[in-house]
Amino acid sequence: MTTTGKAPDVVHPNAELIDRFYTAFNAYDAETMAGSYTDDAAFEDPAFGQLTADEVRDMWRMLLGRATDLRAEYRDIRADDQTGAAHWEAYYTFNGHPVHNVIDATFAFTDRRISRHVDVFDWPRWAGQALGLPGKLLGRTSFLHARAQASARKQLETYRAGQV
């Protein structure tokens, strides 16, 4: 979010929310990210599938709490009163494998908070990077996708059970 010319650009408050969200990501500030969602928010991505507001809040807490080299580069933020979008790229190590995940995010907003968040990325590309040879060989199969998603969900459930 940069300005050009002599007069500053007017930035929509929901675009500022998206910027704060990814700034918090880079600061490992899961609580700011969690607070960005409405109480009935929905989240979806290829790794975890569909999550409720409480689940997505804990997903960020889990991911950022475990991370050692996670960072995001983000751009192309746009938003209005109802919807928004951003392009972001995550860099991290997963099970010893370097990952560069290219993600397009869409958002819906209610009262200046995220009510729906969908991250879309190339699952086979991610699997090839994150899972090594098995991911390269089987990344396009629904079997591996279902198995990896079940594993991600199980990790989240275990994390959430430990938070109670």
Image (spheres, rainbow, N blue to C red):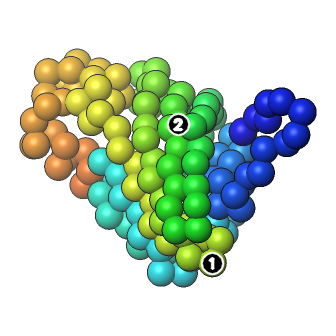
Residue drawn at the location 58% of the way across and 55% of the way down: 79
Q: Is residue 19 above or below residue 160?
A: above
Residue 154 found in image quarter: bottom left
Residue 152 in sight: no
The quarter of the picture where the N terminus appears is top right
SS under mark 2: strand
How crowded pointer 2 is (Cα within 10 Å; few <14, some 14-19, many 20+) is rated as some
Depth check: give the residue in front, 149 or 106.
106
What residue is pinned by disc 1?
A: 111
Question: Residue 67 falls in which quadrant of the image?
Answer: top right
Image spot of residue 35 (x, y percent): 66, 69
Farthest residue, direction front: 6
Dot 1, how many residues are within 10 Å of its Cα: few (below 14), some (14-19), or many (20+)? few
Percent x, y of residue 110: 56, 76
Q: Is residue 18 above or below residue 163?
A: above
Would residue 91 be found to the left or right of residue 141 on screen? Answer: right
- Which kind of residue does numbered mark 2 sit on? Trp
Q: How many marks?
A: 2
Q: Which element type, helix, strand or loop, lies under badge 1? A: loop
- Between residues 2 and 115, which one lies in front from this camera angle? 2
Residue occupied by mark 2:
88
Rendered position, 124 above or below 30: above
**What is the quadrant of the C terminus in the image?**
bottom right
